[in-house]
Amino acid sequence: QLLMTKPPIELVAAGQTAHQIHQEVKAMIRPGLNLLAIEEKVKDMTCRSGMQPAFLGYHGYPATSCLSVNSVVVHGIPTNYTLRVGDVVTVDIGVKNGGWIVDTALTHPVGQISAEATQLIEITKKSLTEAIKQARAGRHVGDISFAIQQIVEAAGFYIIRELTGHGVGKKLQMPPSIPNHGRAGNGPELKEGMILAIEPITALKPVKVTIDNDKWTISASPAVVCAHFEHTVFVTQGDPVILTAPSSSQTG
């Protein structure tokens, strides 16, 4: 990756647009909402911002957002499904601006959900917060991985090991791969100017993952609730810049 001391303004703007899209989608989430309405909202807001959806057409992906419900782990193609009380839905979006890409995901409860699903969401979110603190120049990918694994497994939940975070920037998926489990101090060294998509992906209990016939949707078996949180982060010598968080928390 091109190593810079601060993120390009196009990247910062893409991150803020992605954050705003997430906020508007979050406000929509309720029982009775159709997934296609979320997809339409994401598409509309991305286009009105003058930016481009990073997912649409990526290796032939047919939509602007990935919407994964309950035991769908990632890459759920938006369908004509109406959310019900007790569902859990992950909204994963990518925004491209001036050639720079951010990638970010949030998991939402739909109405009242089970206590264990609530805890899974909270723990997965917490693991992302703690992992981001490790994204500093001189640390290693394993420091991020270890932070996630410790928090998720201490709470009794399961890390879906087949899926990882990744570098991002001029492309949607770039090195390094960022596993959600590992040993502190291991893996590639982090350097100032790296752009990382850090994304813990978890399940209530041990699962196997399968790819559906659509070649995209990855589902958990047995069918248990899964959670997924993701931020795009810019590595500096000090606190990382969380590009897809509100601008007030830009510097940690």
Image (spheres, rainbow, N blue to C red):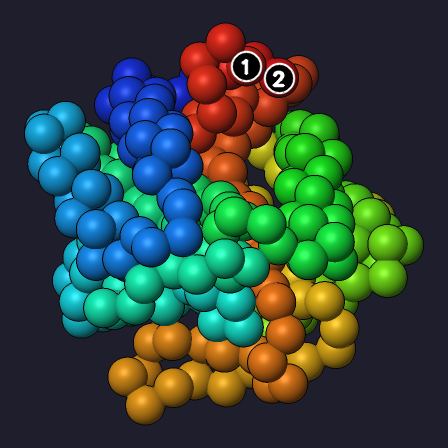
Quadrant into which the N terminus falls = top left
Quick check: 26 above or below 137? Answer: below
Drawn side of residue 51 relative to residue 160, left or right? left
Q: Nearer the viewer, residue 119 or 60?
A: 119
Q: Is residue 46 above or below residue 67?
A: above
Residue at (52% x, 67% y) in the render:
70
Provide the residue designation for mark 2.
252
Residue type at tag 1: Ser
SS assignment at label 1: helix
* Quadrant hosting residue 29: top left
> Going by the image, does 26 lie left or right of 151?
left
Q: Position of residue 135 (x, y in %)?
A: 65, 33
Nearer to me, 38 or 94? 38
* SS for callout 2: loop
Q: CA distance from mark 2 to mark 1?
A: 5 Å
Name the residue at 26% across, 39% down.
95
List the residue tagged with mark 1: 249
